[in-house]
Amino acid sequence: MSRLRRRTILGASALAAFPPRLYAQIATASRPRLLQGVQAGDVGADGATIWSRADRPARMIVDYATTEHFTDARRVEGPSALEATDFTSRIRLGDLPPGQTVFYRVAYLDLGDLKTLSEPVVGRFRMPPASGAPASNTDASFVWSADTAGQGWGINPDIGGMTIYESMRRLAPDFFVHCGDTIYADNPLASEKKLPDGRLWKNLVTEAKSKVAESLTEFRGNHLYNFLDDNLRRFNAEVPMIALWDDHEVVDNWTWERRLDADPRYKVKDARTLAIASERAFREYMPLADGLDGPMRLYRRFSFGPHLDLFRLDMRSFRGPNTVAASNTAYLGDEQLAWLKHALKSSKATWKIVAADMPLGLVVYDDWRTKTGADGLANADDGPPLGRELEIAGLLAFIKREGIHNVHWITADVHYPATHRYDPARATFSDFTPFYEFVSGPLCAGGFGPNAFDRTFGPQIVFQKTPSRIDLSPLEGSCHFGHVKIEGRTGLMTVTHRDAAGGILHTLELAPS
């Protein structure tokens, strides 16, 4: 925080408004605008990232306080929002009070005249409780889902847009885990899409969403599209995000080696070229703790008091080709896998939740039409661990050997909600402690499934809700999210699957071991 303190203005001028020198210009018609609102992200004991975007070159200014009226405000002058970052900017706030709701407001100072200031946009988030806080004060909750604007189902103004974000907001969770497919760069939108019963789904459409994304500008445009939704912007301002990425941020089932020679939609045939541009746009538009320079390192632990640690994984960046070859073992990769083992072993939290972008035991083919290859971990042979499965087998055996308790997984990708229990008594590989995997989604995309199981790790269905047909529309109930609530006094964890309106579909209560 020492670096930030030198740029922090304390005292009367920061309490309620911006300095008179700047505030006098706030009413001008040409002031900067924050059309995408604000969002916080990667909130943990070490702080939070504040993100926004200006409509021109401008300097980011952030006030933050523990009161809604900003009576104890501090100010930080952030970086400039420039064309090089598509006018996005972010700042990491540290030294924040544990367990407190932090209110923040973002404004931009026009670099064209250094006088004109935008109207501020306000957001908030709750800091995790201190690790030594009394148990009765350490309730925690979060929501998770994935898949925004996929399969041609975009923002439909006729139904109020992506209202699932409003349903999640009403639960007032401490944070949101987006388990990937934050955009669908490979799924252009048409103005209308016809349902089997003759109804029409009507989309907002932008130039960037009219074709597959191949340039940095087009990937950025896919992210910008989602911000057109009022529900999403309101949600972002109140619920901080922990974002993962998966395949549709680039192209379906991509790997670094993938070629798109058979896809006439693409002039760029090299998935690596697409992935480099996509990663840049993802890092610009997601409120990540890390900056834009250097390799992206998504995997990270987030601590939310004595009862909850969340471990974010990256199942896309370190994998090998999507084959089932016995020699193809790279999925999480050695470095990430070693980090995860160490982070789990060192965790003192009651519950250890692993956030992944793909399920462990569901078969996700590289080509679902021919049922060949493997985009997921499972290789569909039901046998002993082979290839990619070896990484997870080693991880599960490590968790058992080290006596690490209460480790469960949340994930998405398959476009239907489910709860799976992994049972060594039913598994080909049995050197692990039973655990649950909770699957949810999509947020706004087509419904699919169910996927077949690979029995290597003994999964069994506790709950699932599968669509009546392939590419079920949001109008027909394709969209879902999950909600986790942990009671501070008892440590009881309650997991609910919910529909787009927030209705409960299934509930599972787990007591800590």
Image: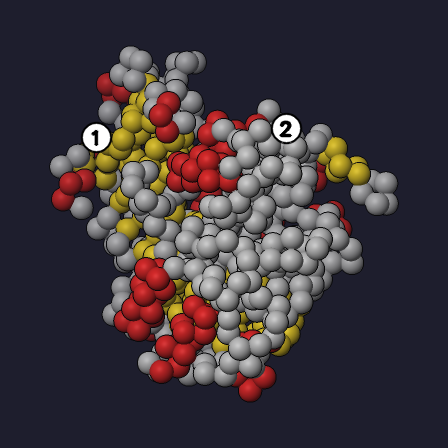
Quarter of the image for the C terminus: give it.
Answer: bottom left
Q: What amino acid is labelled 1 in the image?
A: Ser
- Does residue 245 sit above or below 419 in this rendering? above
- Image spot of residue 293 (x, y percent): 29, 38
* Residue 157 can be seen, yes or no: no
Q: Is residue 286 left or right of residue 506?
A: left
Residue wearing tag 2: 210
Q: Which residue is most to the bottom?
A: 425
Residue 299, percent from left and from top: 36, 56
Q: Residue at x 43, y 13 (%)?
A: 29
Q: CA distance from mark 2 to mark 1?
A: 47 Å
* Residue at 47% across, 61% down: 328
Q: Answer above or below: position of 356 versus 263.
A: below
Give the labeled residue for mark 1.
Answer: 13
Q: Nearer the viewer, residue 399 or 374?
A: 374
Q: Amino acid at mark 2?
A: Ser
Mark 2 vs mark 1: give the one in front.
2
**SS type, badge 1:** helix
